[in-house]
Image (tube, helix red, strand yellow):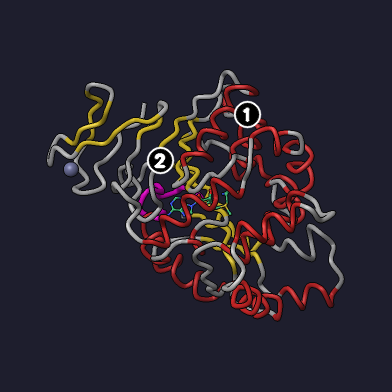
Amino acid sequence: MNTYRCIRCSGQLNAHDGRYECASCRAGYPVVDGIPQLIAEQPATAGDRKTASFFGDLFGSFDEWMHYLDQDTKKNGLRTMFAANGIDLSEVLSSKEKVLEAGCGYGRYTYELLKEGGPDGKQREITCLDLSQENLVMNRRMTRTLFPDSRNEYVRGSVTAIPLPDRFCDLCICTGVIHHIDDYWKGLDEVVRVIQPGGTLIFAVMGSRGLFLKLFWLWRLMNQCIPYAFAKKVLSGMRISDQSRRYILDAGWAAHYHQVGFKKLRSYFLAKGATQVAFLEIYRKMYGYSPLNVWFRGEGFMHMLVRF
Ligand SMILES: C[S@@+](CC[C@H](N)C(=O)[O-])C[C@H]1O[C@@H](n2cnc3c(N)ncnc32)[C@H](O)[C@@H]1O
Ligand SMILES: [Zn+2]
């Protein structure tokens, strides 16, 4: 069982009468459908409120994605990505027992981690945190259905105020999340805070270089006058995969889309005590794109392995 922290004063939270209460400032937090809501009563900004409902809607329903989870893991999963970059996922995961998935979404990496299994044949303790209750419920349904021995915990919270103590985990996975939040650097500071020395971060955000990323802005600008619901309807009627439809909607309508380059992030992580910051190439090494396409993508959706 996790010891959660108050997002107002960092005091310890105790379960009390079906809710959580802070031992220091007495702030109370409800539990909805078995998931503690360790989040400000309203997500802090209009952008965060939009993000919470946007991703719940975007990922659709459990039945919609369940059928391609295994296939997607083989093609786009962590093991495939690391292997393409000459790194063995088993080595990255070895001895890692306490995991935080910050912004876990519907659970493609939760699934892969559980499929990999933990040390000594026992599942790792994975804490799944997300701003979207819908995604947490879907993720939990998947783990309960497919991995009855999982020890996952689910908590609704924000990466900008992680309701967990310092040095909480020895592995953190935070992919596709930080560029979507209002306060990018606060989110990153929080992620680093909860990782133990010797711990590992598997990280992904949008980079800042390449024509592809410049076109993003144009795409987002154009979409200012097209309502999301309308775009979703039009795209649903087109012959494209669920995944592509989600990427297009995510790129065009998510509330925030920060772009920060690898150099800046590497300096940040090194200043925070990282001993290794590796760039994992996906376009060339994992997808085998042509040199022109790789050039066009630039840093693109940038994946990193950071060891502290
Ligand atoms: C593009 S999805 C990525 C999901 C998952 N990490 C993956 O790689 O499949 C972004 C996720 O981040 C969550 N998210 C966005 N802002 C957040 C925040 N401030 N705190 C926690 N989760 C957040 C969204 O609800 C959504 O589930
Ligand atoms: Zn408190």
Residue 209 x %, y %: 64, 79
From the viewer's side, name the closer residue of 173 and 69. 69
Q: In the image, which is nearer the foreground, mark 2 or mark 1?
A: 2
Residue 267 x %, y %: 47, 73
Q: Residue extending furthest top?
A: 148
- Badge 2 density bin: few <14, some 14–19, many ≥20, Cα 10 Å: many
Report which quarter residue 163 is drawn in: top left
From the viewer's side, name the closer residue of 118 and 290. 290
Residue behind mark 2: 156
Residue behind mark 1: 117
Residue 151 x %, y %: 49, 25
Residue 305 x %, y %: 58, 56
Query: Residue 74: within the magenta?
Result: no
- Separation of disc 2 and disc 1 at Cα? 24 Å
Magenta region: which residues? 191-201
- Give above or below for 264 relative to 151: below
235 sits left or right of 45 in the view: right
Within the displayed image, which quadrant is ligand 2 positioned in? top left
Mark 1 residue type:
Gly
Seen at 71% across and 63% down, the residue is 281
- Which of disc 1 and disc 2 is earlier in sequence? 1
Dominant secondary structure, magenta: strand
- Give above or below for 81 relative to 222: above
- Badge 1 density bin: few <14, some 14–19, many ≥20, Cα 10 Å: some
Q: Secondary structure at mark 2?
A: strand
Tag count in the figure?
Answer: 2
Seen at 79% across and 39% down, the residue is 71
